[in-house]
Amino acid sequence: MAFAPLPVVALAVCAVAVVRAAYPPQDVPSSWPHDYPGKPHGDFSPAWQDYFEVKERLPNATWPISRNFAGNLPVNRAGHPNDTLFFWAFEKEPGSLTAHADKRSIEPWGIWLNGGPGSSSLIGLTSENGPIHINSDFSASQNNFSWDRLADYVWVDQPVGVGFSTADSAGYVHDEDEMGRDFMGFLFNLVKVFPSLKTRPLYLTGESYAGTYIPYIMKTYFGLADPPVKIAKFAIGDGTVGSAEVYELVPTVNTIETYPQLVGYDPATFEYFREQEHLCGYDLNLTYPGCGHFPTLKFIPGQGVAAQSMDSASRLNPATRARRQQKLRNVVQLAKRASQGKRRDEALVQKRDLSGRANGTIDPWYGCDIYDEMIDYAVNFSLPWSIKHDDIFGFDIYQVPDALDPEANMDASAFFNDPRTRAALHAPTSKNWQGTILYPFLGDPTSEGNDPMVIQNTTFGGIQGFTRRPSTPWFDDNGERGGIVHQERNWTYVLIEGAGHLVPYTNPLRGFILLRDFILGNNQTGLVTNSSGTVSVVGGESSSLAVDAIPGQLGIYVGSFSTQSTYTYPSATIAAWSNYIVTATATVITPATAITATTTATAISVPSTKAIDGSSSNNGTSHTNAAIHMDRKVNGLLSSLTVALLLFCITWL
Ligand SMILES: *[C@@H]1O[C@H](CO)[C@@H](O)[C@H](O)[C@H]1NC(C)=O
Ligand SMILES: *[C@@H]1O[C@H](CO)[C@@H](O)[C@H](O)[C@H]1NC(C)=O
Ligand SMILES: *[C@@H]1O[C@H](CO)[C@@H](O)[C@H](O)[C@H]1NC(C)=O
Ligand SMILES: *[C@@H]1O[C@H](CO)[C@@H](O)[C@H](O)[C@H]1NC(C)=O
Ligand SMILES: *[C@@H]1O[C@H](CO)[C@@H](O)[C@H](O)[C@H]1NC(C)=O
Ligand SMILES: *[C@@H]1O[C@H](CO)[C@@H](O)[C@H](O)[C@H]1NC(C)=O
Ligand SMILES: *[C@@H]1O[C@H](CO)[C@@H](O)[C@H](O)[C@H]1NC(C)=O
Ligand SMILES: *[C@@H]1O[C@H](CO)[C@@H](O)[C@H](O)[C@H]1NC(C)=O
Ligand SMILES: *[C@@H]1O[C@H](CO)[C@@H](O)[C@H](O)[C@H]1NC(C)=O
Ligand SMILES: *[C@@H]1O[C@H](CO)[C@@H](O)[C@H](O)[C@H]1NC(C)=O
Ligand SMILES: *[C@@H]1O[C@H](CO)[C@@H](O)[C@H](O)[C@H]1NC(C)=O
């Protein structure tokens, strides 16, 4: 079967080539693993478990933590013995990780990957889904929704050189294929230390730019005659799957529909953004089932973006340069978020008043960068966002309703660089831990996901896209609606309401349920079945969810470092908007969407055969017996989780 990420592959390769040209590596540091007392000699084996076990108490972590293991393992890349990945693995129950080969053979285990590129998965461990939560005051607390409560779970820093993983200065990965090979090399060594992992079902999960890593890891995996592990599913949360236009620019209007606060509930501004979207060709209409492929979206740069920088990238064409700027801006923003206090490069922040805007033409300043234009509009003209500090942008790309300025700290570097932590974790001493580095070779953009568009443009199980619009609700453990779930032909799409880009950070309970029920579990809710021609959907469908956008919350968080209050527009303003938007979008039969308030997850089951059928471009023409619903689009902006028998995605980090 084909799966969504495939089309991404070629695009990402092009992007990497561009970035490599634009960013010749310079002054890239070398690092190497540290040998701690008691390190065994010889090849990896279960004898190394005792060496890797974390035995000393970690600073600030005063509660009992399940047995865990950490350290660096080589990726087996020829000529680069110091190229290693750092792992931190937690047992679900005593002895589960150290089981003998062929024991516990049906018990799942999981791997978590953050994105970036260049972000440490220990950010996820300490801020999202791991057992030790580093709070915004840098203290530590227990996370009751830690994913290792459901399965043995391993957080892995990768590619080489990221977080506590090490690389010699010439050994950073050059492209995504090398990343995939490195990852498999690491796994070969990991299963020598923990032999049961070789045959137990592996659930490969990650978010954000891991939406690029994971498809390449799967590509490498399927290419191996004797892979080191048995991958059962992969899940990508709000991943960078699809082109940058698809995952970053296309969701803009849906984001505004989800959070009309971004335009101050102003219909004229909304219409303006809708027009820009149309002029740029980003108003793709989803159909169920899919009907032919979407065109390749183009990016038209504006003067404001193209004029920004004439550095080493100036030899590249303007569109590429503009895109590079956008990517860089995203990375800068990401770095800011990951490591507080970093000064945002003001040269990259361009603002423009929209009041004199040209109607009927693409805005000359922004071009088709409607996402950036939306943020500029919000911070300049919409309450409560603002630019109060020179260096802090009161807009959180991870979570629209967060207008904290400055942002809450999300920085575990004091914890990881403490000598006690470092020694306990067998971490390298040749480098300090950083949440995010600008990866010297990889450098693709990251932002929001738009899973439904990728799904509808992909042929899997012989059919293009989903045959029905996702609109089945799922419910969390409090009995509240958690979002939408839809499952067809081994691909599960989960949209999570009330989650930002970083699902387990923003909504730990729903992130936990996602793993429990839809990734590890096989909850059938949303499954489309066909019994002798009678098509039905487990859990039914809700027309109120088959809409352009599920409205997000009304209150926007304001405060300094933490929420001091919420800002809500006057009820009359909101009511006027509600009346307007019903009419404005009534002519279009809308899809299940939304994501800013929500996060989508897509999971795909790994087929039993090793073939990824990249050429299964069935045009869908033989499936016209089912009703075709015209949908405007289903978006996932700042958060989506791709999960299904394979995947869970959360975007960035
Ligand atoms: C986590 O669970 C423990 C035990 O049930 C409880 O005492 C503690 O308050 C919980 N922590 C949080 C942050 O909810
Ligand atoms: C690998 O690390 C060792 C220190 O452990 C260092 O002496 C050596 O030069 C490094 N090799 C490379 C290729 O950087
Ligand atoms: C999507 O549908 C709308 C409304 O019918 C239409 O204006 C628009 O051109 C369509 N988009 C594309 C890319 O065809
Ligand atoms: C849709 O898929 C086709 C064929 O793979 C590809 O050329 C096109 O760029 C895709 N369009 C979008 C918007 O993803
Ligand atoms: C947006 O706000 C920034 C910071 O206050 C300011 O520099 C910029 O000129 C504003 N842009 C517009 C169009 O008002
Ligand atoms: C475009 O239309 C808006 C109203 O929708 C108006 O405020 C604005 O002045 C117009 N721009 C121009 C250049 O006419
Ligand atoms: C321990 O917590 C305190 C806050 O309670 C914090 O200031 C300190 O940096 C933390 N230490 C480590 C090593 O994380
Ligand atoms: C899983 O399925 C059951 C019905 O079999 C349902 O009651 C439950 O709510 C589902 N879990 C979720 C998260 O939807
Ligand atoms: C879904 O996965 C199962 C188990 O691997 C496989 O038997 C089945 O053929 C797959 N279905 C499709 C439509 O690919
Ligand atoms: C349902 O199955 C029947 C065969 O039993 C097939 O003809 C029909 O196309 C299927 N419908 C859908 C929507 O898959
Ligand atoms: C898809 O469409 C093209 C052009 O319309 C046609 O040549 C091709 O045979 C079709 N493929 C399938 C699998 O129907």
Image (cartoon, rainbow, N blue to C red):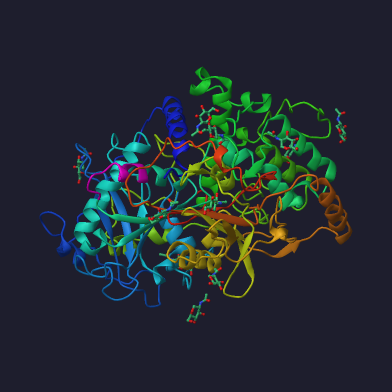
Q: Is residue 315 above or below residue 539?
A: above
The residue nearer to you, when weighing 7 against 75, is: 7
Where's residue 232, x and y in %?
A: 36, 57
Q: Is residue 408 above or below residue 62?
A: above
* View quadrant of ligand 6: top right
Residue 502 occupies quadrant: bottom right
Where's residue 326, x and y in %?
A: 58, 34
Q: Is residue 406 above or below residue 366?
A: below
Residue at the (67%, 42%) spot, across then down: 252
Where's residue 17, x and y in %?
A: 42, 27
Q: How many marks?
A: 0
Magenta residue span = 218-227
Task: State left or right for residue 364 relative to residue 647.
Answer: right
The residue nearer to you, when weighing 482 against 351, is: 482
Where's residue 404, x and y in %?
A: 66, 56
Q: Quadrant of the N terminus?
A: top left
Q: Is residue 52 above or below residue 342?
A: below
Task: State left or right for residue 247 relative to residue 154.
Answer: right
Residue 342 visible from this viewpoint: no
Q: Which residue is farthest top?
A: 315
